[in-house]
Image (spheres, rainbow, N blue to C red):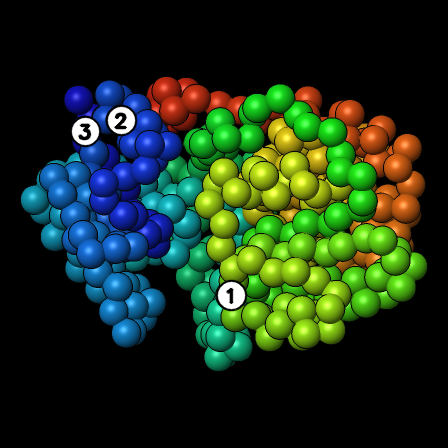
Amino acid sequence: MTRALFVGRSRYELPLSPSLRAKWDAVGRELDFRVVASSAGASTGDGRFRLRPRTRLDGPLFWLTLPLRVRREVHAFRPRAIVAQSPFEGAAALAARTSADVVVEVHGDWRTFGRLYGSPARRVLARALDGVGAWAVRRAAKVRAVSPYTARLVREAGREPDAVFPAYMDLEPFTAPVRPLPNAPVALFVGVLEAYKNVDGLAAAWRIAAPRLPTARLRIVGRGARRDVVEALVREGLATWDERLSTAEVARALDEASLLVLPSRSEGMGRVVIEAQLRGRPVVGSAVGGIPDLVDDGVDGVLVAPEPEALADALVRLLGDRAQLERLAANARAAGERWLTTPEEYAQRVRELVER
């Protein structure tokens, strides 16, 4: 059986959740694999997972030690290929200088990492990080994009993607029969509170829209560096906020909402869009990144510029027009079903890419 080493910044908690276990069990039937990643709990790994424990300088230490960790695992395991979760993990794998081929996955715009995520201090390194990501894409033995948008990013970096297929997403909690829209209009945001999600733009838009929608509510789910923006909305009585919900609770929140709002400045393949569509909820999203790959403007949602005024107008128009909202909602489920895939389908595609 072909051996592959998967490398990523993802945090795993052992034992794996049922959905992750289904994914990796399927991969294990196709490939002999190991995983180098981070720990979300106390475990530092098992026979297949090599997890770095959470520390005070978790992020910098992860990246600084990653080439050495990769080199050590390649020496012990002898994989045919290293499958890197992003161009940055790919760069670390290339820097390890092993005999294994490096397969780089592109889930989004790697230039976001240095500009619109985490501490503003990252912007000092933004140009260098842009170059590192593009270099890894060009130097990799194989590149896999997850959507038409990320395939375009790969082409812009100077090469053709070797495969284009989405990551496996456990969407079963969202595939139950669709429930009717709530009587009172509710806009829901689910995502990390980071600059690339344009949380500040959403707050500004809702301050414009709220006086025109006296019966509507905004609900926010997520946490991150821009929590101050959401805290201000809550203090003003303009929103409710949950820092974290389980998958089942997110599905319930979508059932209690009229629409999902995703005002991102940058977005790869927005899983939450598919989750909302499967629950029969239209999406008001920015016409940027991979969102237009998922949302058909005027059919199952509305696409707008990521500006407060445009976003506010779209929210007022949709939340204030029940007939239009129901028309878009009626088409949403079919839009989301296009992206359903099984763990077995995902695992087979990964094996074919590694062995090609």
One can see residue 139 in this view: no
Amino acid type, residue under disc 3 in the picture: Asp
In this view, the residue farthest toward the left is 76
Query: Mark 1 = which residue?
Result: 224
Amino acid type, residue under disc 1 in the picture: Gly
Q: Counting other residues with Cα less than 10 Å from the Cα at mark 1, is it few (<14), some (14-19), or many (20 or more)?
A: some
Q: Is residue 85 above or below residue 225?
A: above
Q: Is residue 212 above or below residue 186?
A: below
Tell me the tag on residue 78: none
- For image coordinates 56% across by 25% down, the residue present is 175
Give the CA distance from mark 1 to mark 2.
32 Å
63 and 327: which one is in front? Answer: 327
Give the CA distance from mark 2 to mark 3.
11 Å
Q: Position of residue 187 (x, y in %)?
A: 74, 49
- Give whichever of discs 1 and 2 has the lower sequence position: 2
- Give whichever of discs 3 and 1 has the lower sequence position: 3
1 and 2 marks in contact (CB < 8 Å)? no
Query: Mark 3 = which residue?
Result: 32
Q: Counting other residues with Cα less than 10 Å from the Cα at mark 3, is it few (<14), some (14-19), or many (20 or more)?
A: some
Q: Position of residue 271 (x, y in %)?
A: 56, 40
Q: Position of residue 4 (x, y in %)?
A: 23, 35
60 and 183: which one is in front? Answer: 183
Q: Is residue 204 above or below residue 9?
A: below
Q: Position of residue 142 (x, y in %)?
A: 38, 37
Q: Nearer the viewer, mark 3 or mark 1?
A: 1
Q: Is residue 70 left or right of residue 150?
A: left
Q: Is residue 47 left or right of residue 259?
A: left
Total marks shown come to: 3
Query: Mark 2 = which residue?
Result: 25
